[in-house]
Amino acid sequence: MPSFRPGTSFRLLVASLLPAFSAPGAEVPARVHADSAVLELPAAEVTGSPDGDVDAAVYRLDAAALRRFATLEEALDALPGFRVRRQGGLGGYSELSFRGARGSQVDIYVDGIRLNQDGDAAPDLSKWPLLWFTSLEARAGFGPEGSGTGALARVDLSTRDESRANFQGRAGSFGAAEAALSAQAPVGAGWKLSVGAQGQGARNDYPYFSDNGTAYNPGDDGVVRMDNNAYRSRGVRAALRREEAASRQTVSVLWLDSRKEYPGIFPGDARAYTRRSDWLGAWRLERFEGRLPWEIGLQARRFEDAYRDPGQSLGYLSYESARLSTSGEGDARARLQLAPRLGARADARLRAEETKPRVTPYSAAYSSPDATRGEAQGGLAADLDLTPPGNRARTHASASLEARGSLVRFRAEGLRSFPDTAAGLIASKDYRPTALRASLQWGTGAQALRHTVGFQGRLEERAPTSGELLGDNVGVLSKMDLRPEQARALSFSHALTGASSRAAAKASVQSTVFWNDYRDPIRLKAHGASSFMRYENDADYRSLGFEAQASAGLRLAEASLSLTWQDLSVTEGFYKGNRPAYQSPVEIHAEFFIKPPAKSPARAGMLADFRSAYYPGDANVPDSRRAAEWELGAHADAQLGTGGPLRLAFDARNLTGRHYRDFAYSPRSGRSYSLSLSFTL
């Protein structure tokens, strides 16, 4: 494995660019409004480049940067600290990890609507089409928007588009095709209507390396093509928004429906599939005036999930299941200025969720039990301005302290004994997770050169979700003795940004050193020798690491580099000292683009991804070790005509044509190409 010295490369980058940032009066885009539930980000030319002030451990991608990826998971995977394992191509299940923690400890929001509420351990990002979104903000910490108890990070996705109308389409290898439409128009009384629709699909018939189920007989191994792995989705959204000097009000609805097929033991004729239908609705009112700004919101979600296997593709192990989850949530937040340098924040949230089975004759033996989950959560925070008197133009310092508490009550009726005997059991469980958070941030410098450092300390407890308590969601392997998991985290972050209007240059560097300790983590484990899986409290483990992102933009070129290094280790039990499953110590994403000196904006360049070796199990069996993976790609785009509304883009991925041995994590086996078109009015 090559030797990495990330600090050296970033110091050289900054040292070479700082002389260009000495020009006074540099123009820097306006800062994003921190209190907005829907992000409003100006266009940025460099992937992940910050807008104005750089907040430590906050990473942003605008619409142009997002379009350089094929899926939402790929975009998030390119950011420091965030890792996504993808299964089965477009629409296949994705598993998010942040600094070694599970995806359940990352809050995911779409236009301010929280997705962590469908009974699963974590939102499945693979079902959300990338073309819908115009910006992504990943906050590796906590901010004024707040995050729930147990959340170590927050991801905000926005569909907001200020253009009158927009069309985007993409077609590529393996039968992939997708399109998205959106339009905005005023409708009177200060209201603005935004509507959109999308559709996507793929055959997902990529090649992969197969051992034909005989791991100890390499003679029959070879590259085969995936079969019965198709995916398609469709969706619509609408939002009404009114903005005034002292208030903002938004009403939005969204529907997304998807179907994913799966191969079985005999993939030639197997047609097992999952079908998901998701309805979301939200209303939010914000008031900005006075000494007590406040906001309130309501949201509701109806989520139907089914697994069907009419051809019994898994033989005697085949089963079917379906469930319907409905949830409602209300929240309120207020801010109060207690003194010239002291402010306070308070918030409260009430949430209720119900899960019911959708029984068919074939799936009745494995139907999910009725289950309800209620949650009451509240938090108090104090914000202190530590800026030295008389130097506010160049220096800003602040500190915050936050405490959160929750009451979670779970109840399930109709739990079963193994394998399919109805026991009619009633089970209930209460949890009281808490969180303590402290942060300190210090920023210095003028607009042309801004430097920010930050420190965070956290103690986070997370209660199990309904999906984790019910085990496999069919009521057979429930795990009612789960304990809350706890995360202890310390991090030191650094951000440096500079811009020069004279040299048409800008650059930024963000880096974080972190230590996370996970106690009683909840992980999916095999149940004895059977094929069933269930969530259990597993051995403690810790993560010590360094993550960084650097970007630079010049008149004729731009580049960015994202790096994560972390040493993860199990700290107790039989596998003490081993690396947790599917965790690579080093992951890198790099981009380099050339911009020709022409009036029509255009760029072309290369992308590279690297993931160091990893083990598929905690046992770290030497023969099971997956080799390090390199992947190269290319991207080119051009806007037709000076200021023209038409834009074309070409993408190529996996140019080396790698075929990964583990097909469950091989969505890019084989080279792939795509052509994109967008038209904006």
Image: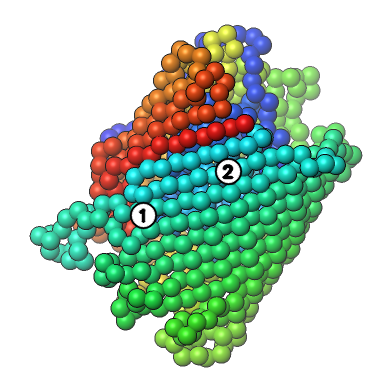
Q: Amino acid at mark 2?
A: Leu
Q: Kindly identify the residue that appears in the image at 56 percent across and 27 percent down.
A: 645
Q: On the image, numbered disc 2 is attached to which residue?
A: 181
In the image shown, does 574 or 426 lie closer to the viewer?
Answer: 426
> In which quadrant of the rendered image does the N terminus lie?
top left
Horizontally, residue 22 falls left or right of residue 348, namely left
Q: Kindly identify the residue that appears in the image at 62 percent across and 47 percent down.
A: 196
Q: Position of residue 460 (x, y in %)?
A: 60, 55
Element under disc 2: strand
Q: Kindly identify the residue that appears in the image at 68 percent across and 55 percent down.
A: 253
Q: Position of residue 119 (x, y in %)?
A: 57, 67
Element under disc 1: loop
In the image shown, does 552 or 345 lie closer to the viewer?
Answer: 552
**Which numbered disc, 1 or 2, marks the residue that appears first in the sequence?**
2
Q: Position of residue 285 (x, y in %)?
A: 80, 49
In the image shown, does 497 or 459 lie closer to the viewer?
Answer: 497
Against 548, residue 615 (above or below) is: below
Q: On the image, numbered disc 1 is attached to which residue?
A: 203
| Residue 299 appears in the picture as rendered | yes
Give the quadrant of residue 291.
Answer: top right
Q: CA distance from mark 1 to mark 2?
A: 23 Å
Q: Position of residue 411 (x, y in %)?
A: 63, 78
Q: What is the crowding at mark 2: few (fewer than 14 residues within 10 Å), some, or many (at least 20)?
A: some
Against 613, residue 411 (above or below) is: below
Q: Amino acid at mark 1?
A: Arg
